[in-house]
Amino acid sequence: MSKQPDQPPAKGGYSRGYLPHLDQPGVLQAITFRLADSMPATRRAEWEELIHIRDAAQQRARLQHYLDAGYGACWLVRTPIARLVEEALLRFDGQRYRLLAWVIMPNHVHVLIETLPGHPLDHILHSWKSFTASKANAILGRKGAFWHRDYYDRYIRDERHLERAVLYMHNNPVQAGLVDKPQDWPFGSARLVDSLDATTTTPYVEG
């Protein structure tokens, strides 16, 4: 019998020096990653205070609000770029992770996945970001950083938290004033749901 290659071990709780992360197979994770210019230096006075907020839930909620304002070039609103990102998310669904919900906003992405054994969370994010950055820069005819180097992740505690996380992602374009109904946004999983009769204005990161 041939020897199977060793699988990368899960890291548990860890930090890459910027934000704390949790990596554990079978955990449902709500993940946010953003474009490199989504918090531009020219507006540093507006977002610098976010760095100093000690309460993690409050910091995430404030960050979400800031990102929804749509600063930066917002390349993800361009259909070819958004489709590229969506295809990357879908590509390894069921192999490296189980994809439950997602929404691609103009300058950031929300994804809800269940991680699978042998595929650490940081490897999944690196795969998404490195592949899409290269392709997107080619489409845009540019060079340089496309994604911000880090990401936020939040493990889902229970069924209620899961429901709120999905509702938040689906309704994010509505809250940001981009569309009237979640299903009208073309870059996310809400359009694939037969009916959405509930909305939420409470960020899942708070509770």
Image: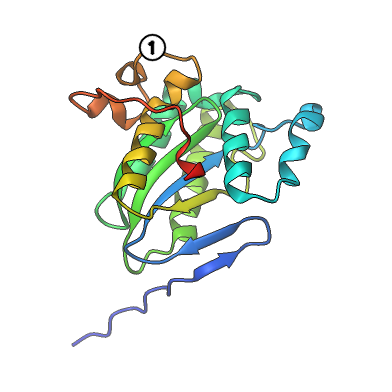
* Displayed quadrant of residue 64: top right
Image spot of residue 205 (x, y percent)? 49, 43
Image quarter where the N terminus lies is: bottom left
Q: Residue at x 68, y 61 (%)?
A: 17
- Up-down relation of residue 177 to residue 114 (above or below): above
53 vs 99, nearest the viewer: 53
| Label 1: how many Cα within 10 Å (few below 14, some 14–19, many 20+) | few
Residue 173: image quadrant is top left
| Residue 126 place in picture, x, y as percent | 50, 53
Q: Which residue is depicted at the point 51% across and 28% down?
A: 139
Q: Nearer the viewer, residue 42 or 126?
A: 42
Kind of residue sitting beneath label 1: Asp
The percent coordinates of residue 200 (x first, y second) are: 39, 28
* Front residue of 150 and 90: 150
Rendering coords of residue 203 (x, y %): 48, 35
Residue 110, above or below 65: below
Q: Residue at x 36, y 38 (%)?
A: 164
**Residue farthest to the bottom, as pictured:** 1
Q: Secondary structure at mark 1?
A: loop
- Tell me which residue sits at (40%, 66%) in the image: 24
State the residue position of label 1: 180
Give the number of marks: 1
Q: Is residue 35 visible?
A: no
Residue 96 vs 169, above or below: the answer is below
Q: Can you name the residue that lies furthest to the top here?
A: 180
Q: How is the image coloured?
A: rainbow
- Whether residue 121 is visible, yes or no, is yes
